[in-house]
Image (tube, helix red, strand yellow):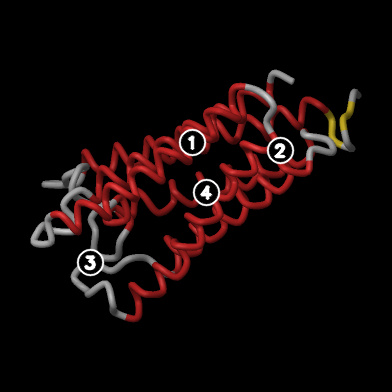
Amino acid sequence: METTFGLPILLQKILLSCGILAALLYAGTDILAGLLKTGYRFDTQSAGVLSAIGSSTRPLVLPLNITAGALMIVFAVGVWFSVGHNWALRVMACLLAGNALLSILAVAFFPWRLGEAASSPANRLNVMFMAPAVILFVLALGFGAVGNQNWLRWFSIGVLVLFLVGFILGMLAGKLAPGRNPGSSVGVQERTMIYSEMLWMALQAILLLQV
């Protein structure tokens, strides 16, 4: 059986395909749960509300998000064995696995709790896991830009620029309209990041499958 870096090529392709499945499952879960939750607003409410303690959609979202995270870790393993000595993409794979692991821990063991202040101990724990998870994914984008020698490099840079512009605009909006509800556009901000991340991961998987 033909192998590359110790793994059969067919197995590598199966592992890489998990990146596409993870992206579709994560995005699909968010859309489905948002549609099922009565009164939910995609533009003004956080995606984390759908998996929070006290949310009617948690029983649906929790197992699907854990599955998506597990698929993402499997994808990261596939990347590690598929990119040879491309150190940047191997670092990217480690960062993606770290992001998925922290996200699973957050949603399963330290979920957001509806009705409690953001400064409550339980919700602080959620932030302590989710904040570094986001940072790891941003770093993965950066190493993806370094490791890819094609159009995906520019797409990775574009997503990073999109994040930066969104962060700056959010900061400016808070300064220019200090009376504005800071969470009024959190749904748009989060989903711009989440869906662009998932698209990027799916594209990375598709590109590696073609090699």
Q: Quadrant of residue 62?
A: bottom left
Q: Is the N terminus in the top left, top right, bottom left or bottom right quadrant? A: top right
Mark 1 / mark 2, whichever is N-terminal: 1
User: Front-most of 30 and 173?
Assistant: 173
Disc 1 element: helix
Disc 3 marks which residue?
Answer: 114
Mark 4 or 3, which is nearer the eye? 4
Q: Residue sitting at 23 percent across and 66 percent down?
A: 114
Decide: is 164 above or below 195. Answer: below
Mark 4 / mark 2, whichever is N-terminal: 2
State the separation of the CA atoms marked 3 and 2.
37 Å
User: Front-most of 141 and 172?
Assistant: 172
| Circles 1 and 2 in contact, beta carbons < 8 Å | no
Mark 1 / mark 4, whichever is N-terminal: 1
User: Front-most of 11 and 27?
Assistant: 27
Disc 4 marks which residue?
Answer: 138
Disc 2 marks which residue?
Answer: 79
Q: Single out the residue that lies furthest toward the bottom.
A: 121
Q: Residues within 10 Å of mark 1 (few under 14, many from 20)?
A: many
The kind of residue tagged 4 is Val
State the separation of the CA atoms marked 4 and 2.
17 Å
The kind of residue tagged 1 is Ala
Disc 1 marks which residue?
Answer: 23
